Image: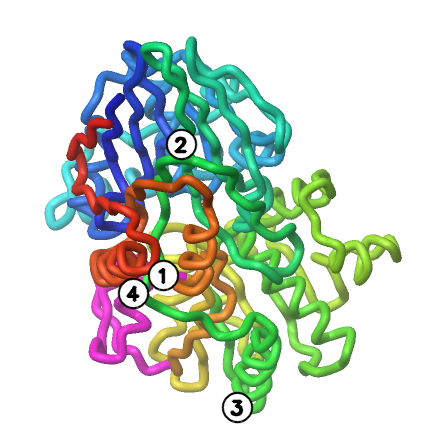
């Protein structure tokens, strides 16, 4: 058996891990890389394997850094199954269609305006039609049910506690008469997050492929999130500014709107417009309401038991058209604008940043992880005073602040506790993290449990 990380190896984006066993090849996720445009464009375009040689894909969840290259896989000839939870299947349909639209529009923009300085134009990575066509491969599975992947391999999804529909994967692999169990954390979530259930316990496995996004960092208590949000909103509103919030359309926007709803119900924030400038977020929110099997008890107690929509209230407006989005530029604050993407690498958020980042009345509020080399990371870095947006230089004159509480990833304490509780665990492959987070995590696992750890580079082969 061989395990080969094709992405998220000593970096956070582009999750794609290949398992070769019994003459078959299985992919765990197939996600987009994010970061410097030229570098990530090359990574996203080139597969290190032949797509038609892959026999099955197991998808942990519908974030783009995990699902985003499946349309390209399909475009290059893959016709095997894509196994996922039912919620992830529904989410993937809208997420990938939106990604295809972004690929088309980005290519159009860069070819028209930046072809000399940025990229040669050879067509989008994939189109909306590619995204729609690949959905025929998706097969929904229930949490907890075993399903056959290929001959000699079956799998089971467990709650990951990360986003709606997110799953950890347990693989039961029989090779040469020997059966072994391997776990894949996907993106391991946190306990007490709003809306969704907490992570399930991982059953006994001998090897775990484990994310390490926050392998050496602690989060603030999730219960402080609303207080931070309230403070930023009230202070910015008092000076007449706009609160610009880059957020992923999937999960993070719903979490923020959920907390804004609770704050407004308690009359703890001023009555200012809350604009969700993301058609994708509106579609995703509809899917949230279709999958109550993913919700925790608090969601039922606070909202659903009263037939109350947690994602819609009097201050909230979801935009629909590009014209409606553009019209926000000419409106004065105070107001709150949530727009995608969360790392500021694509979507409408870049237009809002271009128009608002040089106004000192405004606040740019980061509510999630910003990967290395992304625009979002450069915006929140206090050592950087100017940023390039659409090939123009802008001074960072707006207030820049970060609420680090909302992360959907477990922190170092969550990871330590989770991994150390797994019975029979002998080896851990650390992925989905930068080295400054992975190395201390690996050292703790070795010291606490004597677990052998690997921190492979991309395309490094680990043979079992």
Q: Which residue, as the protein is rendered here, is positioned at the far right?
A: 306
Mark 3 crowd level (few <14, some 14–19, many ≥20, 10 Å Cα): few
Location of mark 4 (residue) = 377
Is residue 146 highlighted in magenta?
no
Location of mark 3 (residue) = 239
Question: Is residue 160 visible in the rendered structure shown here?
Answer: yes
Report the side of 447 relative to 459 (left or right).
right
Residue 395, quarter of the rendered image: bottom left
Cα separation between marks 1 and 3: 35 Å
Element type at marker 3? loop
Is residue 373 highlighted in magenta?
yes
Between 263 and 413, the residue placed more toward the observer is 413
Q: In the image, residue 329 lies at what x, y percent? A: 47, 67
Cα separation between marks 4 and 2: 34 Å
Mark 1 or mark 3, which has the lower sequence index?
A: 1
Location of mark 2 (residue) = 182
Cα separation between marks 3 and 2: 54 Å
Element type at marker 4? helix
Cα separation between marks 4 and 1: 15 Å
Report the side of 259 relative to 252 (left or right).
right
Q: Please state which of the two labelled residues, at mark 4 or mark 2, is closer to the viewer.
A: 2
Q: Which residue, as the protein is rendered here, is positioned at the far left?
A: 116
Mark 1 crowd level (few <14, some 14–19, many ≥20, 10 Å Cα): many
Cα separation between marks 1 and 2: 22 Å
Magenta segment boundaries in residue numbering: 369-398
Mark 4 or mark 2, which has the lower sequence index?
A: 2
């Amino acid at each position: 058996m061989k395990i080969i990380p094709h992405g998220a190896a000593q970096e956070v984006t582009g999750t794609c891990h290949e398992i070769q066993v019994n003459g078959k090849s299985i992919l765990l996720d197939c996600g987009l890389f994010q970061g410097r445009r030229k570098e990530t464009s090359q990574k996203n375009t080139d597969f290190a394997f032949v797509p038609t040689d892959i026999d099955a894909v197991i998808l942990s969840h519908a974030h783009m850094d995990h699902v985003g290259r499946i349309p390209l896989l399909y475009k290059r000839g893959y016709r095997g199954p894509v196994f996922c939870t039912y919620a992830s299947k529904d989410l993937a349909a809208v997420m990938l269609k939106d990604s295809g639209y972004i690929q088309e529009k980005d290519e159009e923009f860069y070819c028209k305006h930046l072809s000399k300085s940025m990229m040669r134009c050879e067509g989008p990575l994939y189109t909306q039609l590619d995204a729609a066509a690949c959905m025929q491969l998706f097969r929904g599975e229930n949490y907890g049910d075993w399903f056959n992947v290929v001959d000699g391999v079956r799998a089971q999804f467990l709650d990951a506690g990360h986003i709606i529909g997110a799953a950890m994967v347990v693989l039961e692999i029989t090779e040469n008469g020997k059966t072994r169990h391997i776990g894949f954390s996907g993106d391991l979530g946190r306990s007490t997050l709003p809306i969704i259930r907490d992570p399930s316990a991982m059953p006994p496995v001998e090897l775990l492929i484990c994310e390490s996004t926050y392998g050496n960092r602690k989060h603030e208590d999730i219960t402080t999130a609303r207080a931070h949000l309230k403070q930023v909103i009230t202070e910015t509103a008092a000076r007449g500014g706009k609160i610009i919030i880059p957020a992923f359309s999937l999960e993070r926007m719903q979490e923020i709107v959920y907390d804004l709803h609770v704050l407004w119900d308690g009359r703890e924030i001023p009555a200012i417009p809350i604009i969700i400038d993301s058609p994708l977020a509106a579609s995703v929110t509809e899917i949230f309401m279709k999958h109550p099997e993913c919700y925790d008890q608090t969601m039922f107690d606070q909202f659903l038991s009263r037939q109350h929509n947690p994602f819609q209230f009097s201050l909230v407006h979801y935009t629909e058209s590009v014209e409606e989005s553009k019209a926000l530029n000419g409106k004065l604050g105070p107001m709150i604008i949530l727009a995608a993407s969360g790392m500021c690498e694509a979507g409408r958020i870049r237009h809002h940043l271009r128009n608002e980042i040089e106004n000192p009345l405004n606040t740019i509020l980061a509510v999630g992880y910003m990967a290395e080399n992304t625009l979002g990371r450069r915006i929140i870095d206090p050592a950087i005073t100017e940023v390039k947006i659409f090939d123009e230089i802008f001074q960072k004159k707006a207030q820049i602040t970060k609420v680090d509480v909302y992360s959907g990833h477990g922190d170092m304490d969550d990871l330590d506790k989770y991994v150390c509780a797994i019975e029979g665990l002998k080896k851990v492959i650390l992925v989905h993290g930068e080295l400054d987070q992975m190395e201390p995590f690996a050292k703790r696992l070795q010291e606490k449990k004597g677990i052998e750890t690997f921190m492979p580079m991309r395309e490094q082969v680990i043979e079992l």
